[in-house]
Image: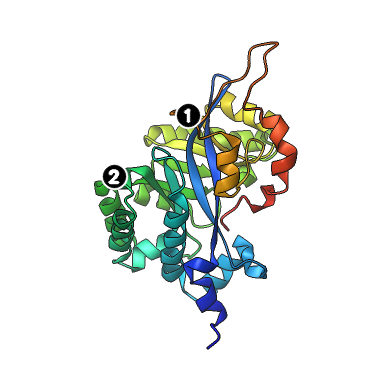
Amino acid sequence: MKKSILETILDPYELSVRFQPIFRIQGGARHVDSVEALIRGPRGTHFERADILFDYVRRKRAEAAVDESCLTAICDAAKGLPSKVRINVNVHASTLGRNSGFVDFFLRHLQKQSFTPERFTMELVEHAPTCNIPELTNSIAELRRSGVRVALDDVGLGQSNYRMILDCHPEYFKLDAYFVRGLSTDSKRRAVVESLVTLAKALGGSVVAEGVDSNDDLSQLEAMGVNLAQANVLCPAISLEELLATGYLSDPSFGTLARPEPGKQNIHNFDQRRTALSLAAWQSFYT
């Protein structure tokens, strides 16, 4: 019997996983801090695009089911990562706020795959205007007790607002790419970023800039005190095989990428990889 579109989408074996490094940028050096696992839908369909895939799932009110399928696919793919690399996974806030069994599913699945919870950061994505806040905060507390860190995705857009910041108290504030692109030449964008950096510091969190597409914007972020960047200009979302081939994760510090001394060549030369990787840059999004 032929599967429906939703059944196909919810099959973990129909999903593919891309990984994008999150770099620590400080003092001119670039270090891989962690990687975010990003989902793509069934190959050869228009649902392969993440925005179309998740928009369809939300309209079907199947967020919790797809989150479980995505987690299953990610854990299977992540088994190929070096054991010390930390992993970010996306989960709808509505899943944590409506499905009391999801945290148990998540932790049991990690144990089954021999992953320690401390390796994971859960990025909360919210597109619904309402959420069961008490259930959400209870789920977050349970995750934290197990060692999982929490990030709030798409800060500055949609439902990732001040209330979500206070209710979730994230360790990481994921600054949406809209506020990052053109930062070096736009004083208004800089004002927004400065305010978020100040807020995150006051709340004991760190800002992660998403979608950084230029070295000028990357340098501006560093000058403003943003030390974590998910930067297409450094490495877009790529397959596990492609990521391992870059060598970024090959040493104990997950790929230390300091700038070379004058006259010396850096063996991890980002610029040499930009042409090959740029074709994949459009895929560097969850939604």
Give x and y (percent) for residue 281: 68, 47
Q: Quadrant of residue 245?
A: top right
Give x and y (percent) for residue 126: 47, 59
Disc 1 designates what residue? 251
Is 6 or 256 nearer to us in this picture? 256
Circle 2 sits in a helix, a strand or a loop, which is it? loop
- Residue at the farthest right position: 275
How far is mark 1 from mark 2, CA to CA?
24 Å
Rendered view: 126 above or below 87? below
The three-letter code of the residue at mark 2 reads Gly
Give x and y (percent) for residue 237: 60, 47
Q: Quadrant of residue 49?
A: bottom right
Crowd tier of the residue under label 2, counting other residues whose Cα lies within 10 Å: few below 14, some 14–19, many 20 or above: some
Circle 1 sits in a helix, a strand or a loop, which is it? loop
Rendered view: 15 above or below 244? below
Rendered view: 131 above or below 87? below
Q: Which mark is residue 44?
A: none
- Residue at the farthest top position: 262
State which quarter of the image contains the C terminus: bottom right
User: Which dot, 1 or 2, sits closer to the camera?
Assistant: 1
Q: How many marks?
A: 2
Disc 2 designates what residue? 147
The three-letter code of the residue at mark 1 reads Asp
| Res. 67 in view | yes
| Res. 184 in view | no
Q: Earlier in the sequence, mark 1 or mark 2?
A: 2
Residue at x 48%, y 53% (from the top left corner): 160
Crowd tier of the residue under label 1, counting other residues whose Cα lies within 10 Å: few below 14, some 14–19, many 20 or above: few
Horizontally, is 247 left or right of 33 in the view?
Answer: right
